[in-house]
Image: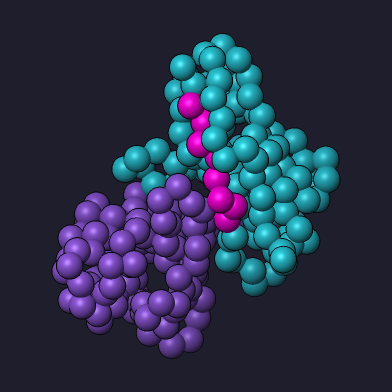
Chain colours: A cyan, B purple
Amino acid sequence: DGGITQSPKYLFRKEGQNVTLSCEQNLNHDAMYWYRQDPGQGLRLIYYSQIVNDFQKGDIAEGYSVSREKKESFPLTVTSAQKNPTAFYLCASRAGGSGTYEQYFGPGTRLTVT
Amino acid sequence: AQSVTQLDSQVPVFEEAPVELRCNYSSSVSVYLFWYVQYPNQGLQLLLKYLSGSTLVKGINGFEAEFNKSQTSFHLRKPSVHISDTAEYFCAVFNQAGTALIFGKGTTLSVSS
């Protein structure tokens, strides 16, 4: 079955440590996204990539970094510079061709930093 | 900048009653609108989308939405809800840059018996 996988589902880290969240898709989609979800805040865009080896900052990129070395993978690193990293992180993808707008989402990773 | 406003943060309703979840968007030349549903600790699932054509859009699980250009609204409706419809619902618009969805803050639908 095609889809998006995120691992792990739950992640715990100590303050000051960097942590990398995994996102893999086998939908052959060009575009991939990272959103952060906090209660009552909706989804906020962190980074997105429309093509391999290229990515753009979203609305809340500070304290995060990404890479897009392969079409199917878009890992997100939460650095120690992110002031409030505890949140639910969602990865998404989109086909990316003209006339494609729908985004497909992974199951999410809940990160807790103490 | 484009934005999406979901007018109710929480909507409590009894089983088998009708429900409407309200969504307004900032105007744009071309508008592509979506409703997603999220069950606890899960990702988002697409309910329905409006890209063009008929302003009444039907989706999964008996939901429908009406695109109203003059009122810049895209309200979600269901004539009779079930306990299993309890979830968070997000309205979204594709941004003018053509790169990503912009989401509202969500509406929590709570269905009780």
Q: Is residue B63 above or below residue B12?
A: below
Residue at the location (48% across, 26% down)? A112
Q: Please provide the residue range marked out in magenta.
A: A105-112
Q: Position of residue A75 (x, y in %)?
A: 70, 37
Q: Nearer the viewer, residue B104 or A105?
A: A105
Q: Is residue A110 shown in magenta?
A: yes
State the count of labels: 0
Q: Quadrant of residue B87?
A: bottom left
Q: Quadrant of residue B76?
A: bottom left
Q: Is residue A37 above or below residue A105?
A: above
Q: Is residue B29 left or right of residue A80?
A: left
Q: Is residue B77 above or below residue A34?
A: below
Q: Nearer the viewer, residue A50 or B58?
A: B58
Toward the bottom, the furthest residue is B54
Q: Position of residue A2 (x, y in %)?
A: 71, 64
The majority secondary structure of the magenta stretch comes to strand
Q: Is residue A104 shown in magenta?
A: no
Residue at the location (68% across, 39% down)? A22
Q: Is residue A7 left or right of residue B39?
A: right
Residue at the location (31% across, 43% down)? A40
Q: Quadrant of the C terminus of chain B?
A: bottom left
Residue at the location (44% across, 79% down)? B59
Toward the top, the furthest residue is A16
Q: Position of residue A10 (x, y in %)?
A: 54, 35
Q: Position of residue A61 (x, y in %)?
A: 56, 32
Can you see residue B9?
yes
Q: Is residue B53 left or right of residue A9?
A: left
Can you see residue B72?
no
Q: Is residue B50 above or below residue B113?
A: below
